[in-house]
Amino acid sequence: MRDAVFRDRAVYFARGDTLVLADLHVGRGEAADVEFPLGEATDLRERLSGLLAAFDPETVVVAGDVLHQFSRTSDAVARSLSDLREACLDAGARPVLVAGNHDAMLSSVWDGPTPDSHEIELSDESPDGPADDFLPETVPGPVVVRHGHETPPAAEADRAGLYVVGHDHPTVEIQGKRRPCYLFVPDAIQGTPALMLPAFNRIPAGVVVNGMSGADFQSPFVTAANPVHPVVWDSEADERLSFPRLGELRQLL
């Protein structure tokens, strides 16, 4: 897919004019038993605004775990989520929240639909840019966004060209430094590939995938670790760094 652009823990699909991010975990700072102004709300809003300015998407999709706490919400959480909605609307983008396993209380702070999945239809225009070294060049079906905590319906998997999920908060350790990473899973569900996003919220530490097996992942979209490609967005160089399959990468580290 020549049109998939990686930046700041999100991915933009140019031919679908859609920005996708996952695992906002709004209220994670509040639940950390410290004062809520850890900078979480400001950080989420400013980084989302930066992505909106960079890509000017028609749609912004959050791939689940919009909220952090399962059983309650606070005024601060409601304000933070309202700020994120306003950021999207001010930029002319339609926000879509896909429900995750943390989102039992989402309807109390969000008055729109919260579907289990969202489909991105890609245009037939010829994409620009070089071919990816890991993503398929063509996707024979819609990009389907899910949280990734449950196995999708078989009929949907047959129709989907690519899944985009979150849930596991992947990171990779390179030269002693932990970095949030994307994971491309070439055969996730019934032969359909998946792209797993890192958590957009920067407070959760994430899980280090270097030594993980397929059984260590919580998402059913990863059942074997060796074929998975880690991808890192380098904010300092403003470029995407692609690594060998995890099975090969382990031997190099």
Image (cartoon, rainbow, N blue to C red):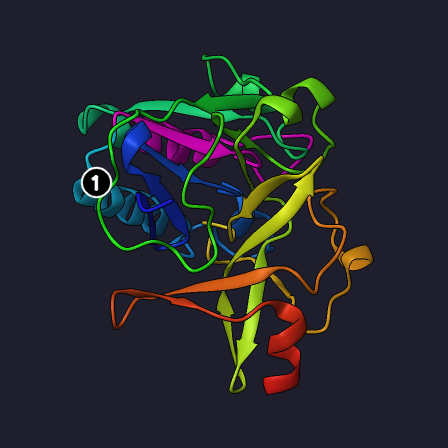
Q: Is residue 205 visible?
A: no
Residue labelled with disc 1: 55
Q: Is residue 233 visible?
A: yes
Q: Position of residue 158 (x, y in %)?
A: 65, 24
- Bin the neighbour count of mark 1 within 10 Å (Cα to Cα): few under 14, some 14-19, many 20 and up: some
In the displayed structure image, the side of residue 150 where residue 33 appears, left or right? left
Q: Secondary structure at mark 1?
A: helix
The residue type indicated by label 1 comes to Phe
Is residue 235 placed above or below 51 in the rendered structure? below
Q: Position of residue 241 (x, y in %)?
A: 39, 68
Between 191 and 47, which is closer to the camera in this rendering?
191
Is residue 124 placed above or below 207 in the rendered structure? above
> Image quarter for residue 69?
top right
Q: Position of residue 228 (x, y in %)?
A: 62, 59
The residue stretch that appears in magenta: 58-86
Q: Is 236 within the magenta?
A: no
Give the mark count: 1
Q: Residue at the spot x=32%, y=28% of the render?
A: 16
Is residue 118 placed above or below 32 in the rendered structure? above
> Image quarter for residue 205?
bottom right
**Quarter placement of the C terminus:** bottom right
Q: Residue at the spot x=74%, y=32% of the render?
A: 151
Q: Residue at the spot x=79%, y=59% of the render?
A: 216
Q: Is 85 within the magenta?
A: yes
In the displayed structure image, the side of residue 59 where residue 228 appears, left or right? right
**Quarter placement of the N terminus:** top left
Q: Among all residues in the image, which is located at the extreme right? A: 215
Q: Residue at the spot x=72%, y=73% of the render?
A: 211
